[in-house]
Image (tube, rainbow, N blue to C red):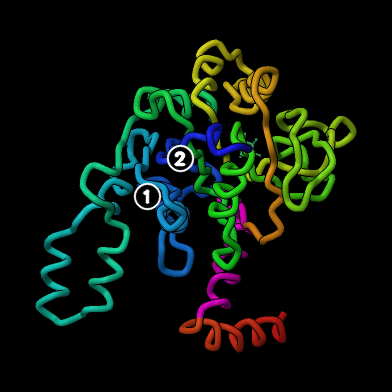
Amino acid sequence: MSASSRPRPLRKMVLPVAGLGTRFLPATKAVPKEMLPVVDKPVIQYVVEEAVAAGIEQIIFVTGRGKGALEDHFDHSFELESTLQSRNKTQALTEVRAPIQAAGNVIYTRQQEPLGLGHAVWCARHLVGDEPFLVALPDVLTDPAAPCLARLIEIYGETGGNVLTLKEVPLEEVKKYGIAATGAPRGDIVEITGLVEKPDPERAPSRLHVLGRYILQPEIFGLLETQTRGAGGEIQLTDAMARLMERQPFAGQVFEGGFWDCGDKIGYLHANLAIGLSRGDIGPKLRPVLAQLQLEA
Ligand code: G1P
């Protein structure tokens, strides 16, 4: 791509966080599922930190009723901060302040009805405006050791257009995801030629699933506006992307790192153990606990 046709810079990220978290009841009755901790940080904080480190400046939450804890988490807590300060708990104070972004850089809107992911993204249209944007599904956690978003944004710098993170899953799991039809890979980049939401294994065009990290062009909003309901009776982002593909290129980032679906109990427990084991302050103490449990099993 020549310098003159360099893709427009990516500044904004949309985080759809309106989901009810029914798979985690009763824990999510009064606590948003995105606030459940993985070791000692809420699930949502991992993706926000990764995106900010990769250069994202504005974070747009598409939230809903009962999600106030999310807003509080990304704001100051003066009482807590002054107590920690007066007790000289500097490390804890740093942790408490870590999620806070520059004033005005975190924006909230509400999805008033649970009409699906496509509808949630459409709710952010005025806040995104006429520029490319990143969408990240916070239930999905990628291994912090593998720089998923930084590489996704780098690929976008090369290809422009729309870029989705893809990851292979076992055939029996394709029914849970958006699945891509692709061309031949060039390193970790593939052309995406088709997308289908939650196909039966026998109809799946591949085993490459859409992992929940998307760079999209703003033309998606016009298509979402007219998108009819698809899989599960919901307005699916996948269906609108399949229509956008008729007009604009789509590339895939074939992600080799690990990921965990924290919207699923086993995925969530797996993320806690994997991230706990990878941490210098926790791993050495957790390892013998796991070994002991395995002996007892
Ligand atoms: C959503 C998307 C799907 C994607 C998945 C990733 O599905 O619709 O295309 O593969 O997230 O986790 P959901 O998990 O909302 O059913």
> At 69% across and 53% down in the image, what residue appears?
255
Find disc 2 in the rendering and name its residue: 10
Q: Residue furthest top?
A: 226
- Dot 2 falls on a residue whose secondary structure is loop
User: Which of the two residues, 24 or 69, is positioned nearer the viewer here?
Assistant: 69
Q: Is residue 109 above or below residue 296?
A: above
The C terminus - image quarter: bottom right
The image shows residue 258, relative to residue 74, as above or below, that is below
Find out whether residue 278 is within the magenta segment.
yes
Other-residue count near label 2 (Cα within 10 Å), few / some / many at <14 / 14–19 / ≥20: many
Q: Reading the chain from its start, which is encountered first: label 2 or label 1? A: 2
Q: Of all residues shown, which one is farthest toward the right?
A: 202
Residue 182 falls inside the magenta stretch: no
Of 278 and 52, nearer the camera is 52
Residue at (84%, 45%) from the top-left corner? 171
- 3D distance between C-alphas at marks 2 and 1: 31 Å
Residue type, label 2: Leu
Q: Which mark is residue 69?
A: none
Which quadrant does ligand 1 occupy?
top right
Q: Position of residue 9 (x, y in %)?
A: 45, 39
Query: Residue tagged by mark 1?
Result: 31
The kind of secondary structure the magenta stretch mainly shows is helix
**Residue stretch rendered in magenta on the structure:** 260-279
